[in-house]
Image (cartoon, helix red, strand yellow):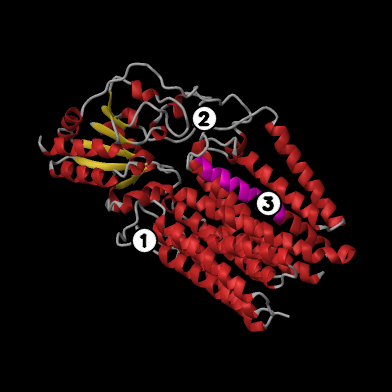
Amino acid sequence: MTESIVWLTIFVLSVFVGVEVISKVSSTLHTPLMSGANAIHGIILIGAILVAGTADSTVTLIVGLVAVVLATVNMVGGFVVTDRMLQMFAGRRRPSGPPPEGGA
Amino acid sequence: MIPTWVQLGYLVAAVCFILALKGLSSPRSARRGNLIGAAGALLAAVIVFFERGLDHLVPILIAIAAGAAAGVIGARRVQMTQMPQLVALFNGVGGGAAALVALLELHELAPLGDRAERFALAATAFTIFVGSVSFAGSLVTFAKLQELITTRPVIFSGLPIAFGGGLLVAVALAVLVVVNPVVPLGVLIGVLGLVVGALLVLPVGGADVPIVISLLNAFTGLTVAAGGYVLGNTLLLVGGTLVGASGTFLTKLMATAMGRSLLNTLFGALRGGSTLGAGQISDRPVRSAGPQDVAILLGYAQRVIIVPGYGLAVAQAQHGLRELVEVLEARGVAVDYAIHPVAGRMPGHMNVLLAEAQVPYEKLKEMDEINGEFKQADVVLVVGANDVVNPAARTTPGAPIYGMPILHADEAKQVVFMKRSMRPGFAGIDNELLFDPKTTLLFGDAKDSMSKLLNSVKSL
């Protein structure tokens, strides 16, 4: 039982961190932020590798490998397209309007 | 048991994800933030092979190589205008992957029967269902944005009942899985998830699609978190939860920027009443003009405000527009760009598109900043935009965009629309401003019209 409590604790704390870190985002960055967050959930790749690596039959292996391919597309494609979007902001260092200068 | 150093590696990766989200919310650190996130993901993808003895290494590595190649090619090749679709697609495949992982995990847990942990089974059912919802929902979203299917809300009688019924059956099946864990039940939940996912997105109107992408993104995050619990992997739990929480919050921010409540976005069309203005091409008289006339209007104005929209980007006319603005400024005309928060197809999309055309960042004025200045503008040039200047958002309760904050282009002395045709915008409704006596229309492909306009202004 105590282990479940540990998991619950991690979950609840992560919820607060997730909201807190992006609470000051300017609307200009909504799209790249969504895209970057999208790439992060590609981390399901770890789960896909684990289930594919412990597959006990041809069918489960194939399903596992499909999951690996899909998760990799999500993760790699997500980070690359986010970088492509953000590249265009580079070189023009001055942000539009007066966004909060604090933060990162 | 997972080696301690691997667990510590996962912790480092989780911290990278937090720093990535933090970095992505400020323009100065955004790119670095994204790279930090990618580094964390790479680290995790390497050390997972040391977590426990894994078989089938060669096929797994081949699958990773194939997925990475597809992802990179897709991300590099896509036109910036089509990027929202691509994000939807990437989100969908992530949800699909999570659902498949959970299905295999159910296959592992099934032989335990009664001894399987109840909560893990519930989390498995959740992941299969929501992952499938996200997969099917994202694919429908992709089809809408790519205009493979209509962008207008698709509603049929009985849809609310089918949707609600689908949810209830899913809950019932999830309870059955917890009591009696067998794989076919899981497959059934997955299929049901696909149907419910499609039903969730079909009634959403085109203009609201970005909000739905963001919501489905948060859904996928939550499924990854639940999958992490089932697999006993803290990194999946933390990463998935971060995305689930920040994604939900971001969805709310976007909905607010569009003046919509989330519930209204999803279910507004179902309530009826908001059916659109038929959408057929109106035959009311409008005033159209040639490039020379518009060139004179612009060239002898003192203050011009440009309202760029998605049509500009589709026609690849943003470079021509930048040139036009430079020529006008050389003539002493003060020019600004008014950027609606959802110009393009996603919040911030237009900023990306104009940045690509090397429009100086400081010339892009956000809506709140510029709305008071339209009264002083001699000419507003609307290029490929429609809904974001539609006064119906202020004046016509019942219009699908009613309540959406708009740019007050109608307050300017003259309005020029560059349009392909009289086709309504993405929201599918007529724009009264087109028929206003002070409005002039310049018909034609935006790129073509833009170069003609540019030449006419140069020869003034």
* Whole-number angstrom distance, CA of label 3 to CA of label 1: 33 Å
Residue A61 shows in this picture:
yes
Q: Which of marks 2 and 3 is in front?
A: 3
- The residue type indicated by label 1 comes to Gln
Q: Give the range drawn in magenta.
A: B128-144
- The residue type indicated by label 3 comes to Val
Magenta includes A45?
no
Check residue B400 in the rendering and tell me which mark sits there, or answer none: 2
Same chain, labels 1 and 2: no
Check residue B201 in the rendering and tell me which mark sits there, or answer none: none
The picture places residue B45, in percent across and down from the top left corner, at 57, 73
Check residue A87 in the rendering and tell me which mark sits there, or answer none: 1
Element under label 2? loop
Tally of numbered tags:
3
Please identify the residue farthest to the top as the structure is shown: B284
Magenta includes B138?
yes
Circles 3 and 1, Cβ within 8 Å, touching? The answer is no
Q: Height in image: B116 above or below B296?
A: below
Mark 3 = which residue? Answer: B130
Please report, as a chain letter, where disc 1 is located.
A
* Whole-number angstrom distance, CA of label 2 to CA of label 3: 28 Å
Q: How crowded is mark 1: few (under 14 residues within 10 Å), some or many (20 or more)?
A: some
Residue drawn at the location 67% of the way across and 64% of the way down = A62
Please identify the residue farthest to the left as the structure is shown: B459
Element under label 3? helix
The picture places residue B275, in percent across and down from the top left corner, at 55, 25
Instruction: Pick the residue in front: B374 or B206.
Output: B206
